[in-house]
Image (tube, grey):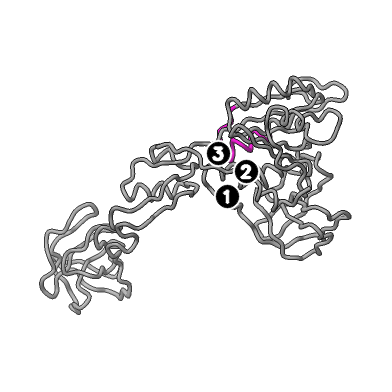
């Protein structure tokens, strides 16, 4: 059994940079940026007004100003400010006329007979200076970033129409177990519904990866082997739930070795999720996840998802929320890092949720975070400040 930190070191040794593809920027949100984005322009490209008002020269102490023209956004001034007592009526985003370096906001002015009069005081400068946001050659977005809508806007602002992104990692899911039945089919004695296939597949999709195939199989060595080979032929990564422990019908480790995969680790000091397995071969990767549903959920969030992002060129960092524990936490065995489902409240308090163990899927119903209790820790008093991983 290895620590989580050791598992990540092993995983990083098997990361290779994925291929790139070019997409229109409108289709790039949620993808991983495959190049640095440089600005070929200054932004703003000219001194511009930050609000509606009147452009003047700041050294001009006149009480009234002759309005030379009105300049809306998208137009360029036709007149310079040459003399004292001159101004240009200007709209937000419009270029300042030559000779002006300040804008008086319209709220403190009056207008009569072609002149602007000051009615109040405006201490602001109200000007966006040319190049203050970015200069030619500036890197505005760096390679490896997970592209969000605001980043699409930034790319558009520097004139980019399309962009190189990493190709999506393709993932398939195999759920094994003779006791599992598809939803919608009446249950027989000893059977349970197949939640793992659906929850893990949903985690793959929700995280932005490409779900290629999903299959449910009985605990039959030849059938499991056949489906593993089939799914590997169409995907980069295969996630297998069940069949990785030490039971009589846990065939997965044996099959993986038989088809030429090297098991890099098997058993991680994580709770739930101890039997977790990772194997590599044929330039592909396989994770063996425990059969209990909370285990598969936790292991995907904590171990699998960061690895899949690394394959796409992105170092995933989960959102960490600081809060105060509302109840005391205690446990008897502290030989593994525990990830316990919790509810993070808007007031910054954190509620421990009823949790009966790794088969208690309903414990995740109201969970929006996982509280990590490190190996060796048996008690956390009520009122303690803790950090929660958002899920």
Residues drawn in magenta: 199-212
Q: Secondary structure at mark 3?
A: loop
In the rendering, at what x and y percent does residue 267 appear?
77, 44
Q: Is residue 150 left or right of residue 357?
A: left
Q: Is residue 293 above or below residue 347?
A: above
Q: Nearer the viewer, residue 323 or 331?
A: 331
Residue at 32% of width from left, 57% of height from top? 137
In the rendering, at what x and y percent does residue 246 appear?
84, 35
Residue at 68% of width from left, 22% of height from top? 227
Q: Is residue 318 left or right of residue 78?
A: right
| Residue 231 shows in the view | yes
Q: Quadrant of residue 256?
A: top right
Mark with earlier residue (3, 2): 3
In the rendering, at what x and y percent does residue 340 appear?
76, 50
Q: Secondary structure at mark 1?
A: loop
Cα gap from disc 2 to disc 1, whole angstroms: 8 Å
Tell me the number on the disc at residue 316: 1
Q: Nearer the viewer, residue 164 or 67?
A: 164
Q: Does the residue at mark 2 contact the one at mark 1 (Cβ under 8 Å)?
A: yes
- State the residue position of label 3: 208
Residue at 30% of width from left, 76% of height from top? 121
- State the residue position of label 2: 305
Q: Quadrant of residue 183?
A: top right
């Amino acid at each position: 059994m290895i620590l989580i930190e050791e598992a990540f070191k092993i995983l990083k040794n098997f990361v290779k940079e994925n291929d790139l593809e070019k997409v229109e920027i409108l289709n790039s949100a949620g993808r991983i940026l495959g190049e640095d984005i440089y600005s070929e322009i200054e932004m703003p490209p000219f001194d511009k007004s930050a609000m509606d008002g009147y452009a003047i020269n700041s050294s001009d102490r006149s009480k009234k100003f002759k309005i030379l023209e009105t300049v809306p956004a998208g137009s360029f001034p036709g007149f310079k400010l040459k003399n004292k007592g001159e101004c240009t009526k200007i709209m937000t985003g419009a270029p300042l006329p030559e000779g002006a370096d300040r804008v008086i906001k319209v709220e403190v002015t009056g207008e009569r007979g072609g002149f602007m009069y000051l009615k109040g005081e405006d201490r602001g400068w109200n000007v966006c200076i040319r190049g203050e946001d970015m200069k030619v050659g500036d890197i505005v977005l760096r390679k490896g970033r997970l592209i969000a809508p605001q980043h699409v806007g930034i790319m558009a602002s520097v004139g980019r129409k399309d962009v190189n992104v990493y190709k999506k990692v393709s993932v398939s899911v195999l759920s094994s177990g003779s006791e599992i039945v598809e939803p919608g089919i009446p249950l027989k004695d000893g059977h349970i519904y197949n939640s793992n296939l659906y929850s893990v597949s949903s985690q793959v999709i929700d995280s932005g990866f490409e779900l290629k195939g999903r299959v449910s199989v009985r605990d039959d060595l030849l059938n499991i082997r056949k489906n593993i080979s089939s799914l590997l032929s169409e995907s980069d990564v295969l996630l297998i739930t069940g069949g990785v422990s030490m039971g009589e019908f846990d065939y997965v480790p044996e099959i993986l070795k038989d088809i030429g995969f090297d098991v890099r680790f098997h058993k991680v000091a994580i709770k739930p999720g101890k039997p977790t397995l990772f194997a590599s071969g044929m330039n592909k990767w396989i994770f063996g996840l425990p059969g209990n549903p909370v285990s598969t959920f936790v292991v995907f969030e904590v171990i699998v998802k960061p690895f899949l992002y690394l394959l796409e060129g992105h170092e995933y960092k989960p959102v960490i929320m600081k809060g105060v524990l509302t109840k005391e936490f205690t446990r008897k065995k502290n030989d593994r890092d525990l990830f316990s489902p919790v509810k993070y409240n808007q007031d910054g308090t954190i509620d421990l949720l009823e949790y009966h163990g790794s088969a208690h899927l309903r414990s995740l119903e109201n969970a929006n975070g996982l509280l990590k209790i490190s190996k060796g820790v048996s008690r956390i008093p009520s009122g303690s400040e803790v950090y929660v991983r958002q899920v």
